């Protein structure tokens, strides 16, 4: 409706917020006078509604607040907390930045890069700060228990969407198609969904799954996805039994373990090589000798149990690998960044 407005007009102020009590004169379109001390006011041409001018004013290199807020959000995404922890409040009631010079430098770099979010992601993730170990010494943890000075990397859990995408990615099942919609229904015809809706069975990346207020995706709600109708500065991270039970019992997770077990059987017949491949695939690192030894004992016991239940040797081995992979998918190392 706003885009289609062909005849913009100036509107009077609603006195005390009431549309029934209007000021006697209209207010010209532009920025509030209170901003004039910090930024030049916006001049709106007579036959334009001012939205373009407002956008240019917000994203102006002369407006440092926009760049600072944005790079702080990007930093929060990668580290779990922003340089300013009140990421939706940079005012006098907000928290001061832990590294003010760094925040200024990042904001300036963001503007000079042409407001490139990809550039900021690459810059932060290639930094020595991001690549630090999460294993802090006892002395360091005592001096800075909240790790606000970034002496090491703060362990954080993946977002719900990233957990789902990771489960699909490790099996090679993720659909990387860009764009489009998963809704076949006409606009406004779909107002509710069932937990087993076929849309949720899609292999598309989680960013394409619908956000329906009446009935959200079960996995997302369990792993702390925020309400789509509310402004949330930062998602909460709970640790509840339902999360572990979901990973243990949900068919989506079980099927991923089954798919990966099938792929593993097609690889090298060497047990050590298979265990190492699993750790590289799921954890991004090679397996240690201790892990290989422990899994060897577990694998032998599982195969014996499956064989005792009447399964053939090949089927027993596949089932044993599925149990091992399922356990690894439920582990903290898989769903956390450390």
Image (cartoon, rainbow, N blue to C red):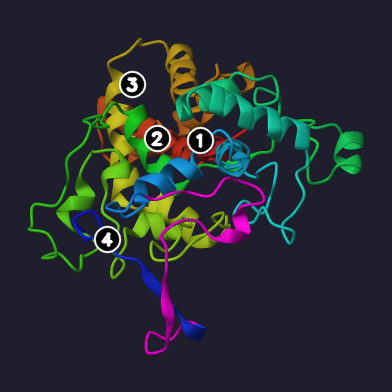
N-terminal label among 1 and 4: 4
Q: Nearer the viewer, mark 2 or mark 4?
A: 4
Q: Position of residue 259 (x, y in %)?
A: 27, 32
Residue that badge 3 annotates: 264
Q: Position of residue 271 (x, y in %)?
A: 44, 15
Is residue 91 positioned above or below 133 on the image?
A: below
Residue that badge 1 annotates: 334
Q: Are marks 1 and 2 in contact (CB under 8 Å)?
A: yes
Residue that badge 2 annotates: 166
N-terminal label among 1 and 2: 2
N-terminal label among 3 and 1: 3
Residue at (29% x, 26% y) in the render: 172
Residue that badge 4 annotates: 8
Is 87 on the left-hand or right-hand side of 259? Answer: right
| Residue at disc 3, secondary structure | helix
Is residue 48 positioned above or below 158 on the image?
A: below
Gap in angstroms between the C-alphas marked 2 and 4: 48 Å
């Amino acid at each position: 409706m706003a885009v289609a407005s062909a005849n913009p007009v100036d509107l009077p102020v609603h006195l005390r917020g009431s549309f029934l009590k209007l000021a006697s004169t209209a207010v010209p379109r532009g920025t509030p006078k209170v901003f004039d001390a910090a930024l030049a006011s916006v001049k709106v041409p007579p036959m334009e509604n001012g939205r373009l001018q407002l956008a240019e004013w917000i994203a102006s290199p002369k407006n440092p607040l926009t760049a600072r807020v944005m790079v702080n959000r990007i930093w929060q995404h990668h580290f779990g907390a922003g340089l300013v922890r009140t990421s939706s409040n940079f005012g006098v009631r907000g928290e001061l930045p832990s590294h003010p010079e760094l925040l200024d430098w990042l904001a300036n770099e963001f503007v000079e890069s042409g407001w490139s979010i990809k550039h900021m992601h690459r810059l932060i993730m290639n930094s020595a700060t991001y690549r630090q170990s999460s294993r802090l010494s006892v002395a360091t943890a005592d001096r800075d228990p909240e790790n606000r000075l970034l002496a090491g990397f703060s362990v954080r859990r993946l977002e719900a969407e990233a957990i789902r995408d990771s489960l699909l990615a490790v099996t090679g099942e993720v659909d990387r198609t860009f764009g489009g919609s998963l809704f076949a229904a006409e606009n406004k015809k779909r107002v509710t969904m069932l937990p087993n809706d076929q849309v949720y069975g899609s292999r598309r990346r989680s960013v394409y799954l619908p956000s329906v207020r009446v009935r959200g995706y079960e996995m997302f709600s369990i792993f702390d996805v925020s309400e789509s109708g509310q402004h949330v500065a930062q998602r909460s991270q709970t640790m509840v039994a339902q999360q572990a039970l979901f990973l243990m019992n949900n068919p989506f997770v079980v099927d991923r373990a089954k798919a990966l077990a099938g792929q593993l059987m097609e690889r090298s017949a060497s047990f050590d090589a298979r265990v190492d491949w699993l750790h590289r695939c799921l954890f991004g690192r090679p397996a240690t000798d201790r892990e290989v030894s422990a899994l060897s004992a577990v694998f032998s016991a599982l195969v014996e149990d499956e064989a005792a239940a009447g399964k053939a040797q090949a089927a027993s081995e596949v089932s044993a690998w599925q149990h091992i992979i399922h356990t690894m998918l439920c582990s903290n190392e898989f769903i956390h960044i450390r």
